[in-house]
Amino acid sequence: MIFIGVALLIAVGLAFLISADAGAVFGLSQGQTAQLIPMLVILVVFAGGLFTRRRKAQELIGSVFLWVAIVGVAALAYAYRDELTNVAARVAGELQPGVAMVDAEQGLATFRRGIGGHFEINATVNGHTTPMIFDTGASAVVLTRDDAEAAGISTKKLNYTIAVSTANGTGRAARVRLDRMEVGGIVREGVVAFVAEEHALDQSLLGMTFLETLSRYSVTQNSLELAD
């Protein structure tokens, strides 16, 4: 218990130094020091166990090898943390195609192709999460009537006078302007969009009125990249 208390005191002390912006600690940045705190606590607790318990030599050696392996794996994970983060993000993108892998520093949002062959996008329209299909053939962002209503747009007052071509054939839509639209951390205000009349569209489309505001967008075999 004494050693556990010492470990916690060390961790709290280092956390205080970091939160107080005390600068680099032992040549490490604050972020690096913060990541090493859990490992330090584990090592101190383990050391306490070695000194406070009597074990047979074989058990002690086995424990040492086990902890050396654990520390080695932890060190490798720390050294390759950026690569592992990218792998984890890619796996998440495969499991949830509509969720973006965001690189905030470069202003990039990457989406994985869905099972159906489309790029599915989870956009946020006026605060409401709206599933969309990436479609460069759509001249504008097009919302289904249900998605428009969920985003706070009063569809009953709209004039459906614009002819649009959809997967269900030719239909009509009404022109609106979206207060706020976010895709993968990329935010735009005042985006022009169409609201399709009821049953004219199965799923909302991410079209050119949003895409043309980007610095670039690119499509490879299985990924879509949007750049702010």
Image (spheres, rainbow, N blue to C red):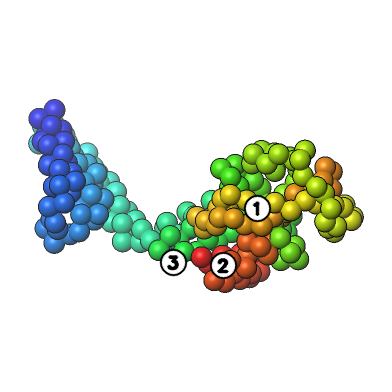
Query: Please, what secondary structure does the residue beneath circle 3 have?
Result: loop
The CA distance from mark 1 to mark 2 is 18 Å
Left/right placement of residue 223 relative to residue 168 reads left
Residue at 87 percent across and 52 percent down: it is 171
Where is residue 35? Give x, y as percent: 26, 50
The residue to which callout 3 is attached is 106
The residue to which callout 2 is attached is 214
The CA distance from mark 3 to mark 1 is 28 Å
Which callout, 2 or 3, points at the residue further toward the start of the chain? 3
Residue type highlighted by circle 2? Leu
The CA distance from mark 2 to mark 3 is 13 Å
Could you say which quadrant of the image residue 215 lies in? bottom right
Residue type highlighted by circle 3? Gln
Residue at 24 percent across and 44 percent down: it is 38
Which callout, 1 or 2, points at the residue further toward the start of the chain? 1
Q: 44 or 25: nearer the eye? A: 25
Query: Please, what secondary structure does the residue beneath circle 1 have?
Result: strand
Residue at 31 percent across and 61 percent down: it is 79
Q: 80 or 212: nearer the eye? A: 212
Residue at 66 percent across and 47 percent down: it is 131
Left/right placement of residue 130 relative to residue 108 reads right
Labels 3, 1: front one:
1
Which callout, 3 or 1, points at the residue further toward the start of the chain? 3
Where is residue 170? Give x, y as percent: 89, 56
Residue type highlighted by circle 1? Arg
Left/right placement of residue 132 relative to residue 52 reads right
Mark 1, Cα crowd under 10 Å, few <14 / some 14-19 / many 20+, is some
Q: 117 or 52: nearer the eye? A: 117
The residue to which callout 1 is attached is 177
Mark 3, Cα crowd under 10 Å, few <14 / some 14-19 / many 20+, is few
